[in-house]
Image: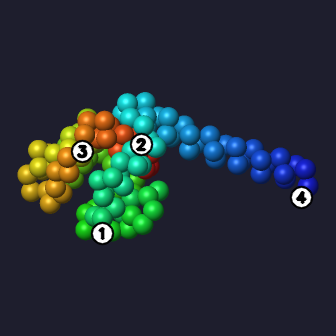
């Protein structure tokens, strides 16, 4: 491979890695949570049993809505603004936001809700 082309490939690869890191850093700063712990907590609560969740192995269920691009949505279930606080409330008690929601309260702790919200805010 010619050197100029190799240099471009190396720079693009580095920039791609930085972009992922900055998205995770922004999500953590916005929510106060930890993205990696959020990914783990999604498995702990079985979220993949109902939702398609990019970045989570085998999370391709269609019982609930896809969580693809959830960070880009303006509202949650068309009911409340998509804010870290509202996502955390939703995760802990969905019926508080929408009494008709079929999503059950799963006993999500405050820390886990914060961490899951951090992960979800990486899904742009």
- Res 37 visible: yes
Looking at the rendering, in which quadrant would you find the N terminus?
Answer: bottom right
Identify the secondary structure beneath mark 3: loop
The tag earlier along the polypeptide, 1 or 4, is 4
The residue indicated by pointer 4 is: 1
- Tell whether label 4 touches label 2 (CB within 8 Å): no
The tag earlier along the polypeptide, 1 or 2, is 2
The residue indicated by pointer 3 is: 108
Residue drawn at x 84%, y 53% as measured from the top left: 5
The residue indicated by pointer 1 is: 62
Identify the secondary structure beneath mark 4: loop
Q: Is residue 8 left or right of residue 42?
A: right
Distance of mark 1 from mark 2, alpha carbons? 24 Å
Q: Position of residue 100 (x, y in %)?
A: 9, 57
Of badges 2 and 4, nearer the viewer stands: 2
Distance of mark 1 from mark 4, alpha carbons? 45 Å
The tag earlier along the polypeptide, 1 or 3, is 1
Of badges 1 and 2, nearer the viewer stands: 2
Of badges 3 and 4, nearer the viewer stands: 3
The local crowd at label 1, few if under 14, some if 14 to 19, many if 20 or more residues have their Cα within 10 Å, is few
Q: Position of residue 42 (x, y in %)?
A: 35, 52
Distance of mark 3 from mark 2, alpha carbons? 13 Å
Q: How many marks?
A: 4
Which residue occupies the foreground of this view, 39 or 77?
A: 39
Which residue occupies the foreground of this view, 51 or 57?
A: 57
- Tell whether label 4 touches label 1 (CB within 8 Å): no
Q: Residue 32, relative to residue 80: is it above or below?
A: above
- Tell whether label 3 touches label 1 (CB within 8 Å): no
The residue indicated by pointer 2 is: 37
Image quadrant of residue 86? top left
The local crowd at label 3, few if under 14, some if 14 to 19, many if 20 or more residues have their Cα within 10 Å, is many
């Amino acid at each position: 491979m010619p050197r100029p082309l190799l240099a471009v490939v190396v720079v693009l690869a580095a920039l791609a890695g930085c972009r992922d890191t900055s998205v995770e850093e922004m999500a953590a700063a916005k929510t106060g949570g930890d993205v990696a712990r959020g990914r783990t907590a999604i498995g702990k609560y079985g979220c993949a049993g109902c939702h398609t969740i990019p970045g989570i192995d085998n999370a391709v269920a269609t019982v609930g809505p896809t969580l693809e691009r959830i960070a880009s949505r303006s509202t949650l279930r068309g009911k409340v603004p998509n804010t870290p606080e509202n996502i955390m409330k939703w995760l802990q008690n969905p019926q508080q936001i929408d009494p008709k929601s079929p999503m059950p309260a799963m006993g999500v702790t405050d820390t886990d809700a914060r961490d899951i919200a951090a992960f979800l805010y990486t899904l742009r």
